Amino acid sequence: MMAFIERWGITIVEATFATFQMVTISLFFSILIGLPLGVLLVISRTNGNGHIWLYRVLNIVINTIRSVPFIILLFALLPFTRVIVGTSMGVKGVIVPLVIFTAPYLARLMESSLLEVDQGVIEAYQAMGIKPLHIIWHVMIREAKSSIILGVTIAVIGLIGATAMAGLVGAGGLGDVAYRFGHVRYQPEVMYVTIVILIILIQGIQSLGNVLSQKAKKD
């Protein structure tokens, strides 16, 4: 055990930190894009203001992106990523495909959560003359808060899996370590340790999400 820690300890710690970087930065931008997009999907779909065309366009775009497996999307976006951030390697080079992959997924989860809100409650606030933005923030999002937290939790777990695949293009992180050392250089113990770390991360995030969701439901 000590020999393993001496040989691989720093490498695995650095890879874990890189994974946290990728997940944190990508999640931040995915939420900035995905959650408002989810709200827009619901509004254009349900309020009957003649914007159903917007919903159809967004629906096609989101479904198209979500139809492409991440590993294929990752390679397809390499030229675009180089244009945006100047590189397609390392943590910086994988943020763009991670955001493009995760934001539509979050938008769908947001849409599903908001559609669960009782339409009668929304109509009651509309009848009282409450402004649409206030209804979105203080009624729809508030009522769906517990479900939204669970949705974001699911998205984070999916994002961790995507960062592991990103290791195939030299993005760094635990996936990169598992592939380069565990698979290519036939060091199975390294792969097993990365698997255990990923399991612990996912279990911790899911448990935290469940707790926060339950707390939001009681508020």
Image: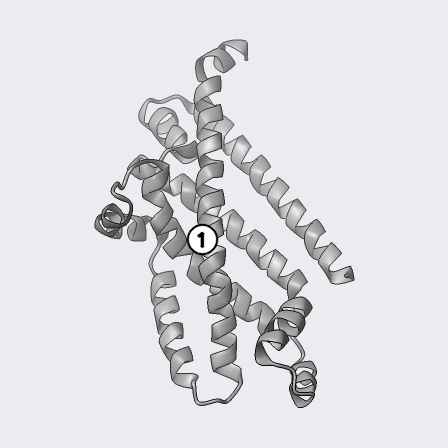
Q: Residue furthest top?
A: 3
Residue name at image x 40 percent, y 30 percent: 178
- Relative image position of residue 130 (x, y in whole percent): 65, 82
Could one spot residue 100 in this view of the protein? Answer: yes
For the point 61% across and 81% down, the residue is 131
The image position of residue 195, as x and y in percent, is: 50, 33
Q: Quadrant of the C terminus?
A: bottom right
Comparing 181 with 117, the one in front is 117
Is residue 110 placed above or below 102 in the rendered structure? Answer: below
Residue 85 pos. (x, y %): 29, 45
- Which structural element holds mark 1? helix
Q: Is residue 216 above or below residue 22?
A: below
Q: Which residue is mark 1?
A: 29
Which of these two is toward me, 206 or 99? 99
Q: How is the image coloured?
A: one colour
Classify residue 209 as left or right of residue 160.
right
Residue at 69% over, 56% down: 213
Whether residue 116 is visible to the viewer of this picture, yes or no, is no
Quadrant in the picture for residue 196:
top right
Q: Residue furthest right?
A: 218
**Residue 108, x across and y down, in percent:** 49, 66
The crowding category of the residue bearing disc 1, from other C-alpha atoms within 10 Å (few below 14, some 14 to 19, many at least 20), is some
Q: Quadrant of the N terminus?
A: top right
Q: Is residue 101 left or right of residue 88?
A: right
| Residue name at image x 38 percent, y 84 percent | 53
Inspect the image, locate mark 1, and give the three-letter code of the amino acid beneath it: Phe
Query: Measured along the vertical axis of the image, is residue 51 above or below residue 4?
Result: below
